[in-house]
Image (spheres, rainbow, N blue to C red):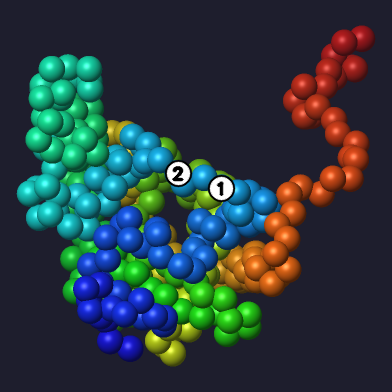
């Protein structure tokens, strides 16, 4: 399937859509991985979720992605106030009169983004992934073949060779620590879901899916990871259960919350005194 430009797209699925504004993607129909995360918590959390207002952390995350994946656009669109300590300063207040506040970075923000950009570019393995020919911020729409549900995802980078890459800002890129981040943020669900959505839309399988973990604080170590088969299988089981539940809720019009049954609950193990130590 060929990639279509957002301005030439008629809004139907399946499609691979380039140059789609971020706001337009999030407002588009279809359930995404973030939506499935809410369904995983409870259908009520998805159904009644308010539109998330952009946070500063989200703005910095976007800046990092732009700097790493589209450095020329970052250089032309972002204002770096390297000598301005915080957003209370007059320099910042003056800058946001003429520029989008999300694209005006003060000293520590600018230094971290620049440091991450420099470190990633110095890693030959990661640099080769980032420099591959392909589409940045490519939106993919398809129908789930089992339920007919419209689904969508958005790749940080999809190469012309059919390889995907996703940049993950993290506090600790070491294996054991990033494994925890994968489980906590359900990155294994994302990789499985994105891989299948791409295949549903194109009839082709991705050749590879890399997660690039980049530490937010200096020295901004960057490590590329590929998920193992067991993690992918687990991610596929989880998104399949969430997607099936979503389809059931759409069909029934019912969006239940937590199971209302009474449960026995205890304080965590670490909060319970050790009797041997006491006596």
Counting from the top left corner in percent of width and height, residue 95 is at 11, 29
Q: Quadrant of residue 166?
A: bottom left
Counting from the top left corner in percent of width and height, residue 187 is at 50, 57
Label 1: how many residues lie within 10 Å, few (<14), some (14-19) or many (20+)?
few
Counting from the top left corner in percent of width and height, residue 107 is at 18, 26
In the image shown, does 85 or 228 lie closer to the viewer?
Answer: 85
Quarter placement of the C terminus: top right
Instruction: Give the labeled residue for mark 2.
Output: 52
CB of mark 2 within 8 Å of CB of mark 1?
yes
Quarter placement of the N terminus: bottom left
In the image shown, does 185 or 57 lie closer to the viewer?
Answer: 57
Look at 7% across and 49% down and name the residue there. 76
Q: Quadrant of residue 85?
A: top left
Could you say whether the residue bearing mark 1 is in a helix, strand or loop? Answer: loop
Q: Is residue 270 left or right of residue 210?
A: right
Q: Quadrant of residue 154?
A: bottom left
Instruction: Give the labeled residue for mark 1.
Output: 49
Look at 33% across and 61% down and name the residue there. 24
**Residue 134 in sight:** no
Which mark, residue 34? none
Decide: is 211 above or below 90.
below
Look at 23% across and 79% down and name the residue there. 8
Q: Is residue 62 left or right of residue 90?
A: right
Decide: is 132 above or below 263.
below
């Amino acid at each position: 399937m060929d990639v279509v430009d957002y301005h030439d797209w008629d809004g139907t699925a399946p499609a691979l859509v380039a140059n789609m504004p971020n706001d337009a993607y999030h407002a588009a129909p279809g359930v995404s991985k973030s939506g499935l995360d809410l369904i995983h918590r409870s259908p009520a959390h998805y159904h009644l979720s308010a539109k998330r207002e952009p946070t500063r952390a989200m703005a910095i995350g976007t800046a990092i992605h732009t700097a790493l994946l589209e450095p020329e656009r970052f250089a032309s669109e972002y204002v770096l106030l390297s000598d301005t300590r915080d957003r209370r300063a007059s320099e910042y207040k003056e800058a946001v009169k003429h520029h989008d506040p999300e694209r005006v970075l003060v000293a520590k923000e600018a230094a971290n983004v620049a440091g991450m950009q420099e470190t990633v570019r110095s890693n030959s393995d990661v640099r080769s992934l980032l420099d591959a020919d392909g589409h940045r911020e490519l939106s993919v729409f398809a129908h789930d073949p089992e339920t007919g549900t419209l689904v969508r995802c958005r790749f940080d980078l999809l190469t012309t060779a059919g390889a995907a890459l996703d940049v993950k800002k993290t506090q600790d890129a070491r294996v054991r620590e990033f494994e925890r981040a994968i489980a906590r943020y359900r990155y294994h669900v994302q990789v499985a879901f994105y891989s299948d959505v791409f295949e549903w839309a194109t009839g082709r399988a991705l050749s590879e899916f890399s997660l690039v973990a980049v530490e937010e604080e200096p020295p901004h170590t960057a490590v590329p990871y590929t998920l193992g088969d067991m993690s992918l299988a687990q991610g596929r089981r989880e998104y399949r259960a969430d997607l099936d539940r979503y389809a059931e809720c759409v069909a029934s019009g019912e969006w239940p919350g937590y199971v209302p049954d009474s449960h026995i609950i205890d304080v965590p193990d670490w909060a319970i005194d050790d009797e041997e130590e006491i006596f």
